[in-house]
Image (cartoon, rainbow, N blue to C red):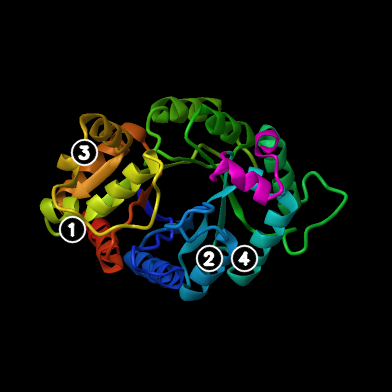
Amino acid sequence: MTNLSVLDLVPVREGGSIAAALHDSAQLAQTAEAAGYKRFWVAEHHAMDGVAGGATSVVLAHVGAATSTIRIGAGGIMLPNHNPFVIAEQFGTLDALYPGRIDLGLGRAPGADPRIGQALRRDLARASEYFPQDVVELRALLTGEPALAIRATPGYGAQVQLWMLGSSTFGAQLAAALGLPYAFASHFAPDQLDQALELYRRQFRPSPALERPHVMAAMNVVCADSDEEAVLLGSSMDQSFVALRTGTPGRLKPPVPGYRQTLSPSLLATLEHMRQASAVGSPATVAREIGKFVERTRADEIIVSGATFDPAARRRSLELTAQALA
């Protein structure tokens, strides 16, 4: 059976608050843990009114305190925004708090408005060029191999599982070269999925951390009692994507009946193209679509993304999805 995990953006609802979003994410993690999901990941985004996961390691500390067994991690930390030493300290601290449960997914994209680079005091274009070296340095800070002139405390010796994230073949090549597990962001960037996974598996070199290739692929999943209800719930997610693509991002909006029928042909085509890796419907529909996706990708794990305006509906979605695939 393919393992299921959860990707959460800590969405802030229209009319809601950041405090409520953080509370909802902790509750969602509790639901995922009870339903048997393997991991609960939070993604780093900055200066987005509808996303409250910018201080990712702090959010993970909050989620860790609300759970007891599920692995928690970053899906991911955008390393060009940071220096490796600070990330080693942060995730070393998380490992000390929640030993044996911490994942650290690393991405190369800044995940931010270009102006954020200035706010972070980072030259993001230059930092992206040094991404492979920074990944190697971060791993060395955690493992001590090779030995560095300074030791991260906390950090050194922490049992943090490193992952490489990607939406292109670049991350696949780096994950293969370093012998790391690889997670592909097919929930919003499906175009190079098959090529990247083939390349990763073909070029993979075993490492002390991983003997053979290990793939996670992301899907947008909304499961409800009927296809019609799931499509309605999923319209909040659709609205967020369209708003982002048209330069008007904001907070998560309530569902709109027949939302896709209100879109122009070009916007609808863009939405449907980017949402190829999706399963929206009843338990039977979701099980069928995830099954086809697993057959296509041969993924070892599926990580499910997708927000609903009502947090209880997303918790219910996770429960129904786990039951459907049991």
Percent position of residue 304, x then y: 35, 51
In the picture as drawn, the residue positioned furthest to the right comes out as: 149
Percent position of residue 285, x then y: 16, 47
Q: Is residue 214 above or below residue 120?
A: above
What residue would you read off at disc 4?
94
Percent position of residue 258, x then y: 14, 47
Secondary structure at badge 1 equals loop
Amino acid type indicated by mark 4: Leu
Tell me, yes or no, whether the two marked residues, 4 and 3, touch with CB atoms within 8 Å.
Answer: no
* Closer to the eye: label 2 or 1: 2
The magenta segment: 109-127
Q: Is residue 35 above or below residue 118?
A: below
- Mark 2 or 1, nearer chain start: 2
Secondary structure at badge 4 equals helix
- Crowd band around label 3 with a 10 angstrom C-alpha radius: few (<14), some (14–19), many (20+): few
- Mark 4 or 1, nearer chain start: 4
What residue would you read off at disc 1?
224
- Mark 4 or 3, nearer chain start: 4
What residue would you read off at disc 3?
263
Q: Residue at x 58, y 41 (%)?
A: 114
Amino acid type indicated by mark 2: Val
Q: Nearer the viewer, residue 267 or 109?
A: 267
- Mark 3 or 1, nearer chain start: 1
Q: Check if residue 120 falls in the magenta segment.
A: yes
What residue would you read off at disc 2?
59
Q: Distance of mark 4 from mark 3, alpha carbons?
A: 43 Å
Tell me, yes or no, whether the two marked residues, 4 and 2, touch with CB atoms within 8 Å.
Answer: no
